[in-house]
Image: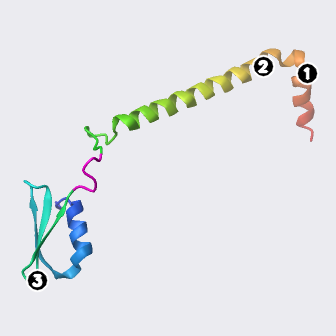
Amino acid sequence: MLRTRQRVGHDILLARHGQSIASMRLDRHSNSVVAVLDDGTVDRAPNLIAADLALPADRTGLTSEDRKVLGIMTAACAGLGALMVGAVLAMVQFGEQLGLTEAAQYLSTY
């Protein structure tokens, strides 16, 4: 079942007038939704929440700012993971000299 896409202007007009809307149409020229009310008056609402809102350019829905933040977070998590793996390998390598193997054996008895 195909449904028409609900636009921001529809929501704004429904919030303003509710059940008193007779019909609605999309005005593509002004990018707004026009509603004819039961009493014959006409109201319109824009389809944009903010005119300077950065909309994603591709189908993933991510802006360049989002990609930058995700890249930084991914690099930070990968770096932390590599640091933890290095710490575990260092403990395995130098654990005998530092007495960590005996501590690990005694820890399991508690």
Of the numbered discs 1 and 3, the one sitting upstream in the chain is 3
Question: What residue is pinned by disc 2?
Answer: 92
Query: CA–CA distance between discs 2 and 3?
Result: 79 Å
Residue 110, position in %: x, y?
92, 41
Q: Quadrant of residue 68?
A: top left
Residue 40, position in %: x, y?
6, 81
Q: Is residue 58 left or right of residue 80?
A: left
Mark 3 residue type: Asp
Query: CA–CA distance between discs 1 and 3?
Result: 85 Å
Q: Quadrant of residue 15?
A: bottom left
Query: CA–CA distance between discs 2 and 1?
Result: 11 Å
Q: Are marks 2 and 3 in contact (CB under 8 Å)?
A: no
Q: Residues within 10 Å of mark 1 (few under 14, many from 20)?
A: few
Which residue is farthest bottom? 39
Question: What residue is pinned by disc 3?
Answer: 38
Q: Is residue 61 above or below residue 77?
A: below
Q: Secondary structure at mark 2?
A: helix
Q: Is residue 40 above or below residue 4?
A: below
